[in-house]
Image: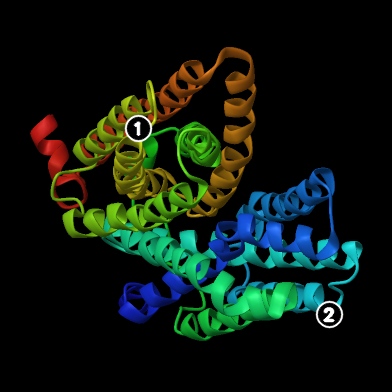
Amino acid sequence: MNQHLRQIDSRISLLGACALGTAGVKIFAVLPLLLGTIAEHLQLDDTETGMVASLYYVAYFVVTLTSMFWIRRVSWRVLASLGCGLMVLGLIGSAVFSESYQGVVAGMMVSGLGAAVVFALSFTLVSDMSDKDRRFAIKLVPEQIIPAALMFILPALVIEDFGLKGMLYALALAILVLAFLSGGIPTRGAAKDDAPQARKQVSGALVFTGLGALVLFFAGFAGLWAFSERLAHDSLDPVLVGQLLALGLVSSAVGPFVAAFVADRWGRVTPIVIGVVLSLGSLFLLVGQITAVKFGLLMAVLPAAYYFSLAYLFGIISDADFSGRFAALIASALALGAAVGPAVFGVILDEQGQNAAYLTAAILVAVGALIFIWMERRLERAHLIAGEGAEKYPRAEISK
């Protein structure tokens, strides 16, 4: 058992989790660029283009939602191979049938199925590791950096010369590389039955409370991010806006990098509060006339602060998941937040204006964070009562 735990905590397992997580978000992260290329290639209208994204999200969400039933029953290496294989198959299928709208949509849906498998698996793998706050933060870094690099590389080196087919084949090749890097993951996880006394002190519904809070927390940010280009479009040059959005993608990797360095030396509550205060404080930059300096500061601060706190939220959900089956649903919560946030933000933006939309996003983030802080306090007390606080929650002794 100890040898198995060492395998889960090994660097090669962490590399595998990072590779699987990056594969799981890759298409999602470059979807705006991919959709634009598909629309131009097939001469699609907005409705047809939106349907490509919607069906991808549907396939993705359904698989992650069912992950609790299979994530502990099937070999993790089989799941990694299956997920990456479906992604590659779907991308190649879309390339082969790129002249057919139905063919492209079918291929994207198959890719969505595979992406959901590997993304859910990446969360479960890290959830079984020790020092999970640091490792969740490390996992977030390549998930931000690699798609950001692709957003720079693909238009100039691939799409311009090879079009949609070239982009799809390039994405498939990247998934194959990531699949190779994930080969060192263990075949199964750790038994999550090591805290029976703590479990008695915490309701089993706590993990679902966390998942609901994550939907709120991510929805607030997703709404702001989805409309960030539109909010600055009327005030700034479109080329400059694109460059500053690219800065935002890089900034989103800085936050997890700092979180990986800080880890749990400040506990979880303090980093969450710092990240949320900085995130919400940066929204004041959007009030009034948007200038290049203000929008640039927003792109430098908001993604970094937000993703800094996000890793700690994953850790709280993982600790609340005593059964070990529900951490994979983090992927579903993120997908649902990504779907709900822009829709809510867009409606309020149209009906009530920008300030009301900013306030709504801020409330969603703040409420989600407050729920997580409450959860962390519950977990601290539960582990202290169970006699596990000195090792697992040293910070709880201070707050007691």
Residue at 31% across / 35% down in the picture? 294
Quarter of the image for the C terminus: give it. top left
Looking at the picture, how far across and down is residue 213, in whole percent? 47, 32
**Quadrant of image for the N terminus:** bottom left
Would you name the residue on which mark 2 appears? 96
Q: Please, what secondary structure does the residue beneath circle 2 have?
A: helix
The residue type indicated by label 2 comes to: Val
Tell whether label 1 touches label 2 (CB within 8 Å). no
Q: Nearer the viewer, residue 139 or 129?
A: 139
Q: Is residue 203 left or right of residue 138?
A: right
At label 1, the amino acid type is Met
Residue drawn at x 64%, y 54% as measured from the top left: 64
Percent across and percent down for residue 131 are 26, 60
Q: Please tell me which residue lies in front, 217 or 351.
A: 351
Give left or right: position of 258 versus 39.
left
Q: Furthest-front residue in view?
A: 237
| Residue 7, quarter of picture | bottom left
| Residue 41 visible, this angle | yes
Question: What crowding class fits label 2: few (fewer than 14 Cα within 10 Å), some (14-19), or many (20 or more)?
Answer: some
Q: Which mark is residue 237?
A: none
> Is the residue 342 above or below the residue 362 in the image?
below
Horizontal side of 327 relative to 197 (left or right) equals right
The residue beneath circle 1 is 375
| Numbered disc 1: secondary structure | helix
Foreground label between 2 and 1: 2
x and y, in percent, of residue 305 in the image: 29, 43
Please identify the quarter of the rendering in which residue 125 is found. bottom left
Classed neighbour count for the residue bearing mark 1: other residues with Cα under 10 Å, few (<14), some (14–19), many (≥20): many
The colour scheme used here is rainbow
Closest to the observer, 370 or 275: 275
Q: Earlier in the sequence, mark 2 or mark 1?
A: 2
Q: CA distance from mark 2 to mark 1?
A: 49 Å
